[in-house]
């Protein structure tokens, strides 16, 4: 009996101790400071001047070895693969609140002064982005430092080093600080709108005039008679809409490439999905643990590994370059070298000036108007970098070299356009050489295959890089790619993406050879069972590669490592081979529902506007990311909703930019060139040299 009482007592004390310990653990985890703490933005700016100023402040928690909370923060932040640095925080503070706190402290101010952050790289970046904010930052840095330390020490018994990213006064409005470039942008977009209205009215008048003497059912689909009429109707919305919805001639060989439509559509959707996850990492949120847990979920793992999927766009670009070049027979063995050089510059310049107007319009928009379309506590944190860098470093984009200068560059998503242009230049030279000297083709391809494997492998080995580029929570938290040399060295340079273009060119060579030998090849292969099974087997191969990539990302290797280097070269090129076979099969109508979807009229339109959707989606994401004033509670449904809405709005914007700007400008370019040097006509708008 006595023994039983002792056991009951032991069990009671054990349970009490366990509950107490668990309570302490939960309490400590709950008291970990949130990554974002923002006071009410609108009520602050509504205060009387001069205290109606709102500042966004970056802070570092000062280490304290005696604090249990600091130990918990350090332990949580140590898993950099999945967790944020919880000692790096953002605050939104109202100056009026801080001034009142400082006044109430009287003589106790000194113990709350800790100075500025030690992260000089980040401080320098924010100084560059918000250079016009220097005076406000200098005036309020001590006040915000004292204020935040007072509140933080009261709640967590820890100190902060602080740095003002920017301050915003309630006396200014989005349109109150317009400069010359802003006004020029308003005029340019206004002129584009007026041109579309006037050109559409004139086109309608021509239709009415013609209806008196002839049938006008297909008026907007037909070419006009004179160059004057073509110029005056170049901005006609209905005419350009019919160009957009026009499909290739059924007798054209290029119609067999309509299968690329669905690849472009899915590709743009996946890019937007990945960039939504990227922007979520930068958002002000209540529940950072959702992101940290989400990165371990299946969809995030697929996106992390799916970065290699970008190769499919390089494959399509290479395929179309070689396909168009060989179909036009621009260079033959009898072509002299001087003529080959002339052809190179004609093709390159034509492609360059087709990209340039759309890119310039987007840079102008992000450098001026975008900044005016939204406000909020974190808006300038997200939008100001593009406004600053699009004004100062626009030349990197128009020279298509911004993939080598990503930190201080405008519109980070345009790295792909730069890499694609550089690869186009390289492989245009190679295509001309192999057309002039066919006997050299095998040797040149062999050297390029070696380079495609060796370059990423050697870079990975000698620079101690990761085998696969993937995002960590801190990768893009500060609106530029930080502490991720794998991204800079092996993901975005053109020379590490040679394999994609080369694979596209080889697929094009094989496709043209098969079609030339058998006119019915595109009608027969997709009906043969073994080819169908081979094509469908590519889909599980995608997931096998993703699984292998996931295992590699989970491992930690001593560097330099020969194994890691070899894997880096193999992994990217295996993706290229599988994506290349996928594209090749679509040329022969493989894929069943995939190919049937590709030939739908809606798919044709979405594929044609995919370039503009890719270009403009980042602006849409910036606007979507700052719809909420206070830190938001993020859920999976929330992320899916943002992805779907961003995709829809990106395509809506792309539709109007394509019909109201891209097609009219391209019409002028076409009219300015002699017929012999045109590389596209109205019947193959979907598939052209500038792979979108």
Image: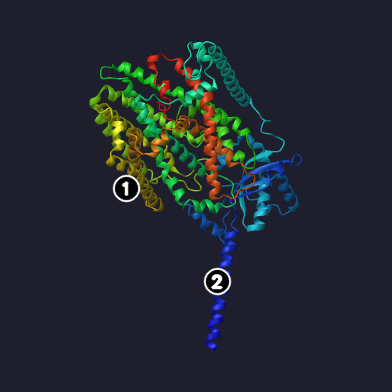
108, above or below 230, in the image: below
Q: Is residue 93 left or right of residue 319?
A: right
The C terminus, quarter of image: top left
The percent coordinates of residue 113 (x first, y second) are: 66, 50
The percent coordinates of residue 599 (x first, y second) are: 41, 32
Specify whether residue 84 is in view: no
Furthest-left residue in this view: 439
Q: Nearer the viewer, mark 2 or mark 1?
A: 2
Q: CA–CA distance between discs 2 and 1?
A: 48 Å
User: Which residue, given by chain and number where applicable, does mark 2 sit on?
Assistant: 18
75, above or below 518, in the image: below
Q: Residue at x 61, y 39 (%)?
A: 379
455, above or below 110, in the image: above
Q: Residue at x 60, y 53 (%)?
A: 34
User: Which residue, given by chain and number where applicable, does mark 1 sit on?
Assistant: 562
The percent coordinates of residue 286 (x first, y second) are: 60, 51
Examine the image and state in which quarter residue 403 appears. top left
The percent coordinates of residue 151 (x first, y second) are: 67, 54
The secondary element bearing badge 2 is classed as: helix
- Dot 1 crowding, Cα within 10 Å, few <14, some 14–19, many 20+: some
């Amino acid at each position: 009996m006595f023994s039983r009482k002792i056991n009951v007592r032991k069990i009671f004390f054990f349970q009490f101790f366990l509950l107490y310990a668990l309570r302490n653990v939960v309490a400590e985890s709950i008291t970990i400071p949130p990554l974002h703490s923002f006071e009410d933005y609108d009520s602050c700016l509504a205060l009387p001047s001069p205290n109606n100023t709102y500042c966004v402040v970056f802070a570092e928690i000062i280490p304290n070895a005696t604090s249990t909370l600091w130990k918990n923060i350090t332990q949580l932040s140590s898993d950099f693969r999945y967790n944020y640095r919880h000692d790096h925080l953002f605050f939104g503070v109202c100056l009026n609140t801080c001034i009142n706190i400082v006044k109430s402290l009287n003589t106790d101010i000194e113990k709350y002064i800790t100075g500025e952050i030690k992260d000089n790289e980040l401080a320098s970046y924010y100084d560059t982005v918000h250079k016009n904010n220097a005076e406000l930052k200098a005036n309020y840095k001590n006040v915000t430092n004292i204020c935040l330390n007072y509140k933080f020490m009261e709640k967590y018994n820890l100190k902060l080093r602080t740095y003002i990213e920017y301050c915003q006064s309630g006396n200014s409005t989005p349109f109150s600080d317009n400069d010359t470039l802003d006004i020029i942008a308003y005029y340019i977009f206004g002129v584009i709108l007026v041109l579309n209205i006037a050109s559409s009215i004139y086109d309608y008048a021509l239709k009415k005039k013609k209806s008196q003497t002839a049938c006008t059912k297909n008026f907007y689909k037909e070419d006009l008679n004179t160059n004057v009429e073509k110029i005056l109707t170049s901005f006609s919305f209905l005419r350009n809409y019919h160009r957009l919805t026009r499909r290739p001639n059924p007798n054209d060989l290029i119609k067999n490439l309509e299968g690329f439509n669905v690849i472009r559509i899915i590709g743009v959707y996946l890019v937007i999905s990945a960039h939504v996850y990227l922007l979520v990492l930068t958002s002000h949120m209540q529940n950072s643990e959702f992101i940290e847990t989400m990165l371990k979920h299946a969809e995030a793992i697929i996106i992390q590994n799916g970065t290699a999927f970008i190769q499919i766009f390089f494959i399509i670009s290479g395929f179309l370059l070689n396909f168009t070049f060989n179909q036009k027979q621009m260079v033959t063995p009898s072509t002299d070298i001087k003529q080959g050089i002339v052809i190179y510059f004609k093709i390159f310049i034509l492609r360059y000036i087709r990209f340039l107007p759309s890119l310039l319009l987007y840079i102008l928009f992000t450098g001026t108007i975008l900044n005016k379309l939204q406000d909020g506590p974190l808006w300038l944190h997200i939008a100001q970098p593009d406004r600053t860098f699009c004004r100062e470093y626009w030349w990197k984009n128009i020279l298509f070299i911004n993939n080598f200068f990503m930190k201080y560059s405008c519109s980070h998503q345009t790295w792909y356009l730069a890499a694609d242009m550089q690869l186009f230049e390289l492989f245009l030279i190679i295509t001309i050489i192999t057309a002039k000297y066919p006997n050299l083709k095998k040797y040149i391809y062999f050297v390029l295959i070696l380079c495609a494997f060796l370059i990423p492998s050697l870079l990975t080995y000698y620079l101690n890089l990761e085998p696969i580029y993937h995002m960590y929570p801190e990768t893009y938290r500060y609106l530029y790619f930080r502490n991720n040399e794998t991204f800079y060295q092996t993901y975005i340079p053109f020379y590490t993406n040679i394999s994609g273009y080369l694979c596209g060119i080889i697929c094009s060579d094989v496709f043209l050879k098969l079609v030339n030998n058998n006119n019915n090849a595109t009608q027969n292969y997709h009906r043969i069972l073994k080819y169908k099974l081979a094509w469908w087997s590519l889909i599980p191969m995608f997931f096998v590669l993703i699984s292998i990539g996931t295992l590699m990302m989970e491992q930690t290797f001593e560097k330099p490592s020969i194994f890691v280097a070899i894997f880096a070269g193999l992994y990217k090129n295996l993706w290229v081979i599988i994506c290349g076979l996928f594209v090749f099969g679509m040329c022969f109508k493989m894929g069943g529902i995939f190919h049937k979807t590709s030939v739908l009229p809606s798919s044709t339109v979405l594929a044609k506007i995919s370039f503009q959707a890719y270009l403009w989606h980042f602006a849409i994401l910036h606007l979507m990311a700052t719809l909420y004033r206070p830190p938001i509670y993020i859920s999976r449904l929330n992320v899916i909703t943002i992805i779907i809405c961003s995709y829809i709005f990106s395509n809506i914007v792309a539709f109007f930019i394509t019909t109201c700007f891209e097609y009219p400008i391209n019409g002028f370019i076409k009219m300015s060139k002699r017929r012999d040097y045109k590389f596209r006509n109205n019947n193959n708008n979907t598939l052209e040299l500038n792979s979108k």
